[in-house]
């Protein structure tokens, strides 16, 4: 199992942060898309590093043309010397429509076709005579037909997925699946992996062609109670969203969702935390001392190909977030 870690914050800090985690021995680092674009952050990370893989986890697909995304990914792959991973996600209906003013329709088949368009663009850039005419996208001029670049590769495409439908799409067309921090080893093993295998089989692919990158939520502190409160609150925050209902139901906790939403609406973080019992906490997240988390991460081995370690952010102040991040680097980095 490889180890990756997120990078972010002010753009002036992204490059030094990426260099730090590269020097610590991480296999990959990943830029998120929240206030800033993930692609610019990835470019900053690439420019500051030499060896580490750099990915987006995730960039939003539907607000962008798949041709623009393909062009951007190829640029970053060239800039990195073949180290870039293009991680994409559908996001939810409200964000697509209310923030980006784009329609939200049939996200799984649309994202599947999105990957097909991107690969059509890259094939055209290599000199192939190809077009894409599909249900959602029609790209009949995928390249300006400049000087062909026959030796360039397809950039790995990863999709963020939670449920079995999008996981099957990953198995069918993606090079990787990025799991959510609330997706437990049990959920990945019993729901996500079988769906990847099903999608791969239907597409005539091998399941191993789709990397499974998990995102275990980890809080490290000598104050074990503090670490556990932090991950419990983060689990509670995520669990208020309907998207993750199936995960809670798998662990027999579907009944707490209504109470969690009421507590969240009342801004009652203590109540939110109290609704996450120790069993659910330990099933989903890892909290404790450095020694504790080194032992507990073994539960993810054999379930995923890569663990993109991350810490809770809903609740802890900036100082504590950075303290935990530094602990993650120390515990999971593999220095050369």
Image: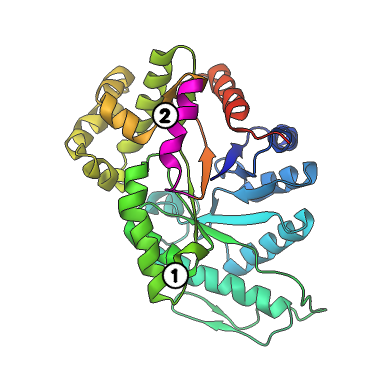
Mainly helix, strand or loop, the magenta region? helix
Q: Is 297 part of what is drawn in magenta?
A: yes
Identify which residue is drawn at 22% across, 36% down. Answer: 257
* Circle on res. 6: none
Query: Front-most of 92 and 122?
Result: 122
Asked which secondary structure carries label 1, the reply is helix
Q: Which mark is residue 172?
A: 1
Q: Position of residue 215 (x, y in %)?
A: 47, 41
The spot of residue 270 in percent (x, y) is 30, 17
In front here: 205 or 97? 205
107 displayed left or right of 120: left
Instruction: Please report contact status of discs 2 and 1: CB closer than 8 Å, yes or no.
Output: no
Q: Which residues are magenta?
A: 291-304
Residue 33 coordinates in the image, percent (x, y): 56, 45
Give residue 166's quadrant in the image.
Answer: bottom left
Q: Nearer the viewer, residue 24 or 259?
A: 24
Q: In this picture, is 323 found above or below 7?
A: above
- Residue at numbered disc 2: 286
| Left or right: 280 in relation to 177 | left
Q: Secondary structure at mark 2?
A: strand
Residue under the point 44% across and 49% down: 95
Colouring convention used in this rendered image of the protein = rainbow
Can residue 276 be seen? no
Q: Mark yes or no: residue 48 visible.
A: yes
Tell me the quarter of the image containing the C terminus. top right
Left or right of 75, for residue 257: left
279 is within the stretch colored magenta: no
Q: Is residue 310 left or right of residue 200?
A: right
- Classify residue 163 by image quadrant: bottom left
Q: Residue at horizontal 47%, vertical 69%?
A: 206
């Amino acid at each position: 199992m490889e180890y990756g870690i997120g990078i972010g914050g002010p753009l002036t800090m992204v490059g030094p942060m990426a260099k730090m985690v590269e020097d610590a021995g991480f296999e990959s680092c990943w830029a998120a898309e929240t206030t800033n674009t993930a692609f610019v952050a990835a470019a900053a990370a690439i420019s500051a590093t030499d060896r580490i893989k750099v990915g987006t986890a995730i960039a939003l697909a539907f607000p962008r043309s798949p041709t623009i995304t393909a062009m951007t990914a190829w640029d970053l792959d060239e800039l990195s010397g073949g180290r870039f991973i293009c991680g994409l996600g559908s996001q939810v209906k409200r964000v697509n429509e209310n923030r980006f003013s784009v329609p939200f329709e049939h996200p799984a088949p649309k994202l599947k076709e999105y990957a097909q368009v991107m690969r059509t663009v890259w094939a055209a850039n290599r000199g192939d005579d190809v077009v894409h005419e599909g249900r959602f996208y029609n790209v009949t001029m995928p390249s300006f037909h400049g000087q062909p670049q026959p030796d360039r590769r397809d950039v790995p495409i990863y999709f963020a997925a939670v449920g079995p439908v999008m996981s099957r799409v990953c198995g069918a067309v993606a090079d990787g699946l990025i799991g959510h921090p609330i997706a437990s080893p049990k959920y990945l093993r019993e729901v996500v992996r079988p769906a990847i295998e099903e999608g791969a089989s239907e597409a005539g692919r091998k399941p191993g062609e789709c990397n499974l990158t998990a995102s275990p939520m980890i809080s490290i502190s000598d104050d074990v109670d503090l670490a556990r409160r932090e991950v419990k609150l983060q689990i509670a925050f995520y669990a208020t969203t309907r998207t993750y209902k199936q995960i809670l139901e798998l662990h027999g906790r579907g009944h707490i969702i209504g109470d969690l939403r009421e507590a969240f609406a009342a801004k009652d973080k203590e109540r939110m935390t109290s609704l996450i019992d120790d069993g659910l906490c330990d099933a989903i997240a890892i909290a404790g001392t450095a020694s504790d988390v080194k032992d507990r991460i073994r539960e993810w081995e054999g379930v995923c190909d890569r663990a993109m370690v991350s810490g809770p952010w809903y609740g802890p102040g900036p100082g504590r977030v950075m303290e935990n991040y530094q602990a993650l680097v120390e515990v999971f980095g593999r220095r050369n």
